[in-house]
Amino acid sequence: MTRRTFRFEQPDRVVVGTVGRPGARVFHLQVRQGSRLVTVRCEKAQISELAFQLDRILDGLAAHAADVVVPPAVQTPDDLAPLDAPLDEEFTVGTMAMAFDDSSKRIEVEMYAVSDDELMINDPTMLLTTFPEAAPDSLDIFMTTSQARSFVARCHVVEASGRQYCPYCSQQILSAKGHLCPRSNGYRKPLVW
């Protein structure tokens, strides 16, 4: 099978979103540039880690790179619109990498499809440099610093929109039937939202 690489050097939109109910949500990352649209499937933990690492890169650039304009962190993203249709998944994300590209002044995010290849699992860099044709499908996104800040804010909004937390014990309420709070010591009815 031929390896596919989706490359977006100047994307118009980079967002994460979900499909499904809390507790059974499927996370997607979607990139659009002009009429090109690519959607990949992710895990919630990957979205969380991606947001965390992008924040670290942006904060590092703001502190140490005088020639790069980095906007401050925002709580509300510019784009809260739903994912674009059609929602056709190209692949499920396995390995991710990111770096700052000094020539374009953009943050590059690389995502690779889940792979059974032992070399990709143990040392993806070696596989990509020595046998690039054997690497799995990939998605390369080059974001401006302002796009990255808004993307991080949207990641936080999407993550927080899942299951509710118990106001008494702070545990997630995992069932639609409610939650028997350990702080109630068995004397209260289950909390239901």
Image: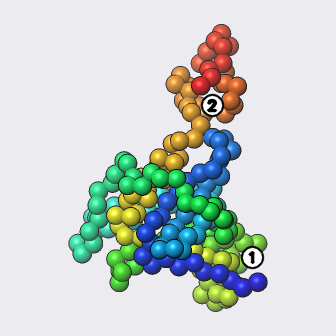
130 or 16: nearer the viewer:
16
- SS at mark 2? loop
Does 44 sit left or right of 66 as displayed? right
Question: From where the camera sits, is residue 141 visible?
Answer: no
Residue, x 53% and y 47% (percent of image)?
159
Residue that numbered label 2 is attached to = 173
Residue, x 68% and y 83% (percent of image)?
3
Quarter-wise, where is residue 114 in the image?
bottom right
66 or 3: nearer the viewer:
3
Question: From where the camera sits, is residue 74 visible?
Answer: yes
Q: How many marks?
A: 2
- 174 vs 63: above or below: above
Give me the disc on residue 55: none
Residue, x 67% and y 68% (percent of image)?
91
In the rendered image, residue 113, in percent from the top left (x then y), is placed at: 66, 71
In the rendered image, residue 174, in percent from the top left (x then y), is placed at: 67, 33
Q: Earlier in the sequence, mark 1 or mark 2?
A: 1
Residue that numbered label 1 is attached to = 117
- Residue count near mark 2 (Cα–Cα under 10 Å), binned few <14, some 14–19, many ≥20: some
- 31 vs 127: above or below: above
Residue, x 56% and y 27% (percent of image)?
166
- 162 vs 50: above or below: above
Real-space Cα separation, disc 1 to disc 2, in angstroms: 38 Å
Mark 1: which amino acid? Asp
- SS at mark 1? loop
Mark 2: which amino acid? Ile
Does 94 sit left or right of 84 as displayed? right
Kindly give the residue lying farthest to the top in the view shown.
Answer: 187
- 56 vs 174: above or below: below
Q: Quadrant of the N terminus?
A: bottom right
